[in-house]
Amino acid sequence: MATIAIHGLCKSYGKTEVLRDIDLTFEEGRIYGLLGRNGVGKSTLLNLITRRIFPDRGEIAVDGVPVGGPGDPLRKIYCMSEAALYPENMRVAELYRWTADFYPHFDRARADRLTAAFGLDPKKRIKSLSTGYASIVKLIVTLSSGAEVLIFDEPVLGLDAGHRSLFYKEVLSLYGEKGCTVVLSTHIIEEISDLLESVIILEDCRVLASESVDGLLERYHCVSGAEGEVMGYLSGREVVHTERMGPYLSATVAGPADREQADRLNLTLMRPKLQDLFIHLTQGKGGTL
C-alpha cells in the first residue's frame, strides 16, 4: 500500500493564498477524513496530490517517489472529483473499459456488481445521467480502480440516503478486503464519522489538526447542566463553544474532564461528536472564562 508524504506545500491563485507550508502524511492502510469549510483548499490539496494543478512550492511523494518526476507513481492513486475527466458522450460500460487501460488492476467484476447494486444502466451515456447517477458512476470507477489510494472529493453529491449507505458499506468492505488507503473529503461529517480512523482539518491556509479521530476527540469534552454550575466548572478552562437552552448551558471544553467536580455540581459529561467539534473549532470562537 502507498504512503503520501507532503512537505512545505504552498499554493496561491493570483493574490489569494490557499495553502501555506502544508506538511502532511497520509499513511498506508487508513481511512482519512479531509475536513474544512468551503474555500479552505481541500480540493486544491487533492488536485495537487494528483498533479491536476501544480504547487508554487513544496514536494509531494508517494512511497518516496516524487509526483511528476521519473517513475511517476500516480497510478497508485485514483481521485474522484466533482469534475468529470472523461468524454461525457461515453457509455458507462465504455468508461469501465477505458479506465482499465490506465489502471491495470481495475476490477471489472466489482464494477459490474456495483452497477447492478446501484441500479445503474451500463448502456446509458454519461451525459444523460442525473446528478446522483453521475456521482454513482464515478464512485463505481474509483472503488473498482484497483488503486492503492482512493480519494473521494464530495462523493455523495446528489445521492439519496439508500445510495449513500451502500457507498459507505462498500468503502468498508473494500478497505477490509484490500487494506487500501481511503481519503474522504465531504461536508456530511456525521455520516462518515464512524468510518474514519484519522482526520485532517484545514483552516486559514494551514493544517489545524492531523491525528487519529480518537486522539482528537479525547482532547475535548462536553459538559452540560444548570447555567450557574456549568459556569463554575468552566472557570479557568479553555472553552471552545457554549450554547444556552433556557436555564441550562452546554459547553465544549479543551482538556481532560474533571469527573469529580462535575459530579459534585450535578453536571453531565459527554464525549463530543466529530461534526460538532469540527464546527466549533473552525468558527474561531471560544476563550478562557
Image: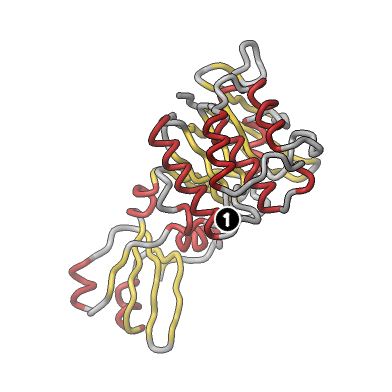
Residue 159 spot, x, y in % from top left: 61, 55
Residue 132 spot, x, y in % from top left: 66, 53
Q: Can residue 23 be seen in this view?
A: no
Give residue 90's quadrant in the image.
top right
Give residue 114's quadrant in the image.
top right
> The C terminus is located in which quarter?
bottom left
Counting other residues with Cα less than 10 Å from the Cα at mark 1, is it few (<14), some (14-19), or many (20 or more)?
some
> In the visual, does 210 lie left or right of 35?
left
Above or below for 79 versus 207: above
Q: Which amino acid does label 1 sit on?
A: His
Q: Residue at x 77, y 41 (%)?
A: 125
Q: Mark 1 points at which residue?
A: 187
**Label tally:** 1
Q: Residue at x 64, y 40 (%)?
A: 138
Above or below for 231 versus 278: below
Residue 153 spot, x, y in % from top left: 61, 44
- Helix, strand, or loop for circle 1? loop
Specify the farthest residue to the bottom: 247
Q: Residue at x 55, y 32 (%)?
A: 144
Specify the farthest residue to the top: 70
Q: Which of 169 and 261 is in front in this view?
A: 169
Above or below for 278 versus 210: below
Residue 98 spot, x, y in % from top left: 70, 26
Q: Which residue is drawn at 28% across and 69% down?
A: 269
Q: Nearer the viewer, residue 134 or 249?
A: 134
Give residue 260's quadrant in the image.
bottom left
> The N terminus is located in which quarter?
top left
For the rendered model, the colour scheme is: secondary structure
Q: Nearer the viewer, residue 58 or 127?
A: 127
Q: Is residue 262 visible?
A: yes
